[in-house]
Image (cartoon, rainbow, N blue to C red):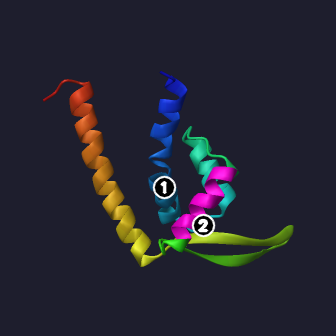
Amino acid sequence: MDIQNTQSQMRKGILEFCILSIIKQAEAYPSDIAASMKEADLQILEGTLYPLLTRLKNANLLTYRWVESVSGPPRKYFSLTPEGLEFLKELEKTWKELSFAVNQITHNNF
């Protein structure tokens, strides 16, 4: 069995949750999101990030606004929609439940 594939699948499963959590803190430009992920030791490639942002926007979980840049083209800053905030709350609840259950199992505390 390939451990790297399993690790990759585990990380992919939490990307949306992490991205929405970052954007909840403040409106974010994609490179800001990638930097926050990297700071937390969760690497994300642009080829992964941009399609995820588009999918979240198309699901009406995110919106964006264009901001003029002094050093290049306008930048797209993302923020949560009310639906996105509710979705994130559900993900937070699910994460807490899963985290608790996995900790119970892996630490034999049940």
How many numbered marks have been drawn onto this rendered protein structure? 2
Nearer the observer, 58 or 32: 58
- Give residue 50's quadrant in the image: bottom right
Identity of the residue drawn at 47% across and 31% down? 6
In the image, which disc is placed on residue 37?
none
Q: Position of residue 47 (x, y in %)?
A: 68, 51
Given the current orientation, which residue lies at the most extreme right position?
Answer: 71
Q: Position of residue 41 (x, y in %)?
A: 56, 37
Residue 49 located within the stretch drawn in magenta: yes
Given the current orientation, which residue lies at the most extreme front position?
Answer: 1
Within 10 Å of the Cα at label 2, are there few (<14), some (14-19), or many (20+) other Cα atoms? some
Q: Position of residue 12 (x, y in %)?
A: 50, 45
Q: Position of residue 71 (x, y in %)?
A: 86, 67
Q: Main secondary structure of the magenta part?
A: helix
- Give residue 99's quadrant in the image: top left
Instruction: Answer with left or right where residue 108 lies relative to residue 31.
Output: left
With respect to residue 68, does 13 lie above or below? above
Identity of the residue drawn at 85% across and 71% down? 70
Identity of the residue drawn at 27% across and 35% down? 102
Q: Secondary structure at mark 1?
A: helix
Disc 2 marks which amino acid?
A: Thr
Residue 45 located within the stretch drawn in magenta: no
With respect to residue 26, does 18 lie above or below? above
With respect to residue 17, does 106 lie above or below? above
Q: Secondary structure at mark 2?
A: helix
Instruction: Answer with left or right where residue 66 lies relative to residue 2.
Output: right
Identity of the residue drawn at 55% across and 71% down? 57
Whole-number angstrom distance, CA of label 2 to CA of label 1: 11 Å
Disc 1 marks which amino acid?
A: Glu
Residue behind mark 2? 54
Q: Which residues are magenta?
A: 47-57
Residue behind mark 1? 16
